[in-house]
Image (spheres, rainbow, N blue to C red):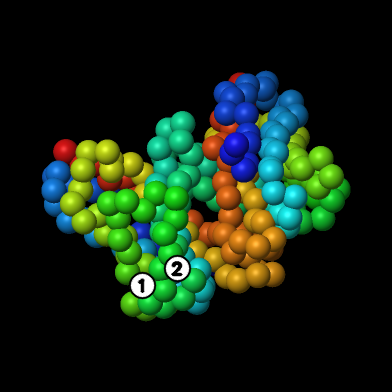
Amino acid sequence: DVKVTQSSRYLVKRTGEKVFLECVQDMDHENMFWYRQDPGLGLRLIYFSYDVKMKEKGDIPEGYSVSREKKERFSLILESASTNQTSMYLCASSLWAEKLTRYGYTFGSGTRLTVV
Amino acid sequence: QKEVEQNSGPLSVPEGAIASLNCTYSDRGSQSFFWYRQYSGKSPELIMSIYSNGDKEDGRFTAQLNKASQYVSLLIRDSQPSDSATYLCAVMSGSARQLTFGSGTQLTVLP
């Protein structure tokens, strides 16, 4: 089974801190994604990456950046955490084309971030 | 207009009944469709994918796709309290390499 591992299940950070959320997948997936999920707003795409060193903005990239130095690892960075970034953060990965068609995304277990 | 629409619910059904969850999408070029289940505080997990018109069955779950009408549905037969969760519909369009998610339907199965 594909495993997508997020480094922390719960995090509490202070306003203004730089926050790193790590995501590692172990099945050689090309595509990796970062979402945040808030009640009533559903899943919102922050950033995604189709290859090492590649990154593309999603729907809500403001206040975030990402890094993909290795194929298996995709990091989300909150440059200066704010209270409105309190949320559940979900990492996902997938294969290309026919495999994506068949298997969709695999999600990590999520990181619930609270910014105080 | 949202690209993938779901009724937010909550939808309540009695134990043993059929739960019917619906999803409509706007992109006629959409190719593949997915249903995810998400328990409270957990991450989404894939239940089924479907890409051909018609029905696809997997145990108590049946996905139905009608591309002409641009809707996809999920039927859960013999609903159990353990089916209580939020169900997310996701769509892969022809040109995109990613999924677009609906906001989910919350299902409660009453014992």
Q: Compare residues A57 and A31 and report the one nearer the observer.
A: A57
Task: Rate crowding at label 2 as few (under 14), some (14 to 19) or many (20 or more) other CA atoms within 10 Å.
Answer: many
| Quarter occupied by residue B15 | top right
Residues under numbered marks 2 and 1 in contact, where contact means CB atoms less than 8 Å apart: yes
| Residue at x 40% of width, y 53% of height | A46
Residue underneath mark 2: A49
| Quarter occupied by residue A113 | top left
Q: Chain of mark 2?
A: A
Residue underneath mark 1: A68
- How far across and how far down the image is residue B79, in percent? 69, 31
Q: Secondary structure at mark 1?
A: strand
Task: Rate crowding at label 1 as few (under 14), some (14 to 19) or many (20 or more) other CA atoms within 10 Å.
Answer: many
- How far across and how far down the image is residue A8, in percent? 29, 55
| Quarter occupied by residue A112 | top left
Q: Quadrant of the N terminus of chain A?
A: bottom right
Does label 1 lie on the same chain as label 2?
Answer: yes
| Residue at x 30% of width, y 55% of height | A64
| Residue at x 73% of width, y 31% of height | B20
Q: Chain of mark 1?
A: A
Q: Earlier in the sequence, mark 2 or mark 1?
A: 2
Which amino acid type is marked by label 2?
Ser
Q: Compare residues B6 and A72 and report the one nearer the observer.
A: B6
Q: Is residue A8 visible?
A: no
Q: Quadrant of the C terminus of chain A?
A: top left
